[in-house]
Amino acid sequence: MKSKCLIILAVSSLILNFGCKESTTTNPDSERVVKSGSGIKMDGELPSKESIPVLFDEMDFQQATQCYLWGLPIVAFAEWQQQHYKTFGATSNDLVLYNTYHDRLGILTANATTPYIMSFIDLKANGPTVIEMPAGRTAGGLSDFWQREEAVIGEMGPDKGKGGKYVLVPPTMKDFKADGYFIIPCTTVNNFFGFRTLDPDPKVTEELVKKVKIYPYAQRANPTPTKIVSPPADKNWYGIQPSGIKYWECLHAILQDEPVEERDRFFMAWLKNLGIEKGKPFAPDERQKNILIAAAKKGEQMAMANSYEKRFKDVRHWPDKKWDYVITMKNSAQREENFDEFFERSAYFYEAVTFSNAMISKTPNLGQAYLGNYTDSSGNWLDGGKNYTLNVPANPPAVNFWSITVYDSATRCLIDNPQQNADLSSRKDLIKNADGSVDLYFGPKAPAGKEKNWVQTLPGKHWFTYMRFYGPTTAYFDKSWKMDDIKEVK
């Protein structure tokens, strides 16, 4: 019982510390919404007339918190897309190269080890759109704006790494045909395209990226050249879900472009009661606006609990350790036999972006495996003002490489520390122990002589980490290789 109480207190502490970054001034209507549950008066067997508005406020507030969780994947992509278009100056036909540490600081749980090449493609603006992939060692794919995988491109795709032309077809066009192309029927109007080059030589990456082309199918005879854009070095940006009323403005805007799926019609009805409706401007009244602001704050707190203290069955890779499966969805469709994975989807897409079936590989030596850790060995949140150590045993189960990356718990982005480093990996020159294991260190200051094995954390901020295995081996799947928890150094 005592340990359960401690966990509840820890979760409560997280919620209080990580609320959305809105004004701290109290709004009386917001307070009424949050506290209304205990203020209902009855007139015999019926609610009193004065309690009816309070009940409707409560109903709208509760539904708004769930709409917040529901919208996490599409709002994340929509906000990131706007960073591409407005902050970077990229278009639907350009590629953004995330190559440096600074480039990746605004991406939800980015890998700090390998470069990303990405594009957001608007089929409303482009119509059917061509992606030309060159021959070469690439791994990538396409997903819709609910972050469901639509196609694999590159070595694991239909071109088998030999290169080819793909055409993305809008959801309204059902009978599109084009000889010589791999046809991809898209489920949303906006789509995400991203890939990595598998050769570690940066020169090979540079040459491959230059050969990728994106253009409207209608311009295939004379396409405008695809530009390669980099995030601006002089600007800080975040491609994450915004807080407060901006979350709902972003959700409303992207819903105007996207088809409504059968599974989402109830959510659209709830949003209608809150002043968010397809085909109409975003114009909530004062009551609705207050509810939306309060629900965004509470919804984010729910999202934190749902991500950082996952309550899904068999979520731990090793039952007696703190390492969670980051991705608990069973497939990229986010769907099981009798339900859609609402809470599993919310947990992952609050803290991360992009998903493919290769990221939950069940085949040794292929794909990736992701484990997350949010607490130390005692179950306390990882604190940027404290020092910790982690022992990575010899022979980690990865054919290609492994990496461990540190993220800011509030932003879910790479920790932005003075060291300008967020990861340690087998691709770095780490100090090894005599038995082949590696001791890693996390804290405000490096232990003497251990600087190579250290990531700097920030006092006053919590952090969490992902352990990635690229090409996870049999030892990962049968759990014969086992890693300890992160331990506080007193």
Image: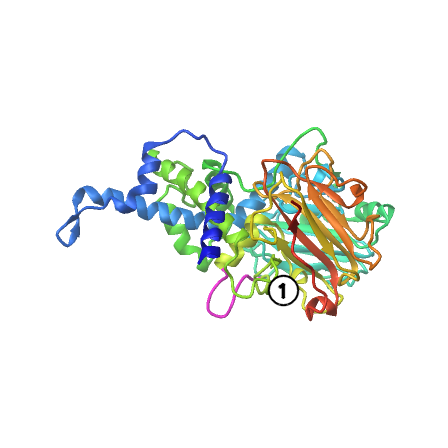
Q: Residue at x 70, y 28 (%)?
A: 234
Question: Residue 101 at what x, y percent from top left?
Answer: 73, 39
Question: Residue 476 at what x, y percent from top left?
Answer: 71, 66
Q: Nearer the viewer, residue 40 or 138?
A: 40
> Is the magenta region chiefly helix, strand or loop?
loop
Q: Specify start and end residues of the magenta stretch as a single range.
A: 333-341
The image shows residue 287, relative to residue 351, as above or below, that is: above
Q: Quadrant of the image for the N terminus?
A: bottom left
Q: How many labels, in total?
A: 1
The image quarter in which residue 232 lies: top right
Q: Quadrant of the image for the C terminus?
A: top right
Question: Residue 311 at what x, y percent from top left?
Answer: 50, 59
Question: Residue 35 at what x, y percent from top left?
Answer: 31, 42
The image shows residue 124, relative to residue 470, as above or below, that is: above
Q: Label 1 is placed on what type of residue?
A: Trp
Find the residue positioned furthest to the front. Answer: 490
Q: Is residue 192 left or right of residue 471?
A: left
Q: Residue at x 67, y 35 (%)?
A: 88
Q: Which residue is mark 1?
A: 318
Q: Residue at x 60, y 42 (%)?
A: 383
The image quarter in which residue 414 lies: top right
Query: Label 1 neighbourhood size at 10 Å, few (<14), some (14-19), many (20+)?
Result: some
Q: Nearer the viewer, residue 159 or 328?
A: 328
Q: Is residue 82 left or right of residue 449?
A: left
